[in-house]
Amino acid sequence: VVVKGNVLFVFGQDSDLSPLYTIEVGSVIATQQDPKKPERGAYTISPTVNSHDSRKNLVTVILKDEASKIQKYQMTFDTRNDKSVAKRFMDVIAVNKKQYGGMIVDAGVITKKGSLKEE
């Protein structure tokens, strides 16, 4: 996941040259999911044995459409190596939304040769 300006780029692997998809930051609200009261429609990632609870090291952030408040995306972060990663992600979304929220999204990917490949 990379956030630049008003765009959130979602990659499948670190080595991917292009994102799987992009999300306009200005159109979403990021909230941390309460593991005891999951959002309707949210998926439990890596549930514990005989339970629907996520493992303790996983924190889920829900991205809702700002206008409709409907869940659009779900990001789950592994916090074993960095307890603050989900909070920092939500902070970046909030700051970039405030700073770049009104900008028109025009995303592209820079190839290894340095040319721009339009998405």
Image (cartoon, helix red, strand yellow):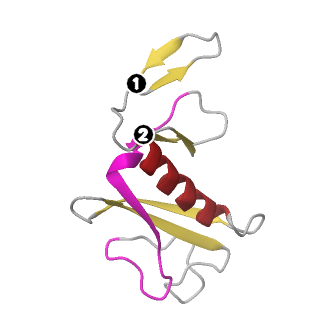
Amino acid marked by disc 2:
Thr
x and y percent of residue 74 in the render? Answer: 44, 61
Q: Nearer the viewer, residue 101 or 10?
A: 101
Quarter that holds the C terminus? top left
Question: Which residue is drawn at the image coordinates 29% and 59% (left, top)?
Answer: 66
> Is there a contact, CB below 8 Å, between mark 2 and mark 1?
yes
Seen in the picture, residue 89 relative to 99 is either above or below; the reply is below
x and y percent of residue 85 in the render? Answer: 66, 62
- Along the horizontal axis of the image, is 70 left or right of 50? left
Seen in the picture, residue 33 relative to 111 is either above or below; the reply is below
At label 1, counting other C-alpha atoms closer than 10 Å, the crowd grade (few under 14, some 14-19, many 20 or more) is: few
Q: Earlier in the sequence, mark 2 or mark 1?
A: 2
Asked if residue 98 is among those painted magenta in the image, a careful observer would answer: no
x and y percent of residue 2 in the render? Answer: 57, 42
Asked if residue 20 is among those painted magenta in the image, a careful observer would answer: yes
At label 2, counting other C-alpha atoms closer than 10 Å, the crowd grade (few under 14, some 14-19, many 20 or more) is: some
Seen in the picture, residue 64 relative to 111 is either above or below; the reply is below
Which residue, given by chain and number where applicable, does mark 1 sit on? 119
Question: Which residue is drawn at the image coordinates 52% and 69% (left, top)?
Answer: 60
Residue 113, by quadrant, is top right
The magenta-colored residue range is 18-41
Seen in the picture, residue 61 relative to 94 is either above or below; the reply is below
Q: Nearer the viewer, residue 79 or 106?
A: 106
Work out how far the residue at label 2 is from the one at label 1, CA to CA, in angstroms: 9 Å
- Along the horizontal axis of the image, is 82 left or right of 61? right
Question: Which residue is drawn at the image coordinates 46% and 38% (left, top)?
Answer: 20
Which residue, given by chain and number where applicable, does mark 2 sit on? 22
Q: Secondary structure at mark 1?
A: loop
Looking at the image, how many numbered discs can be counted on the residues?
2
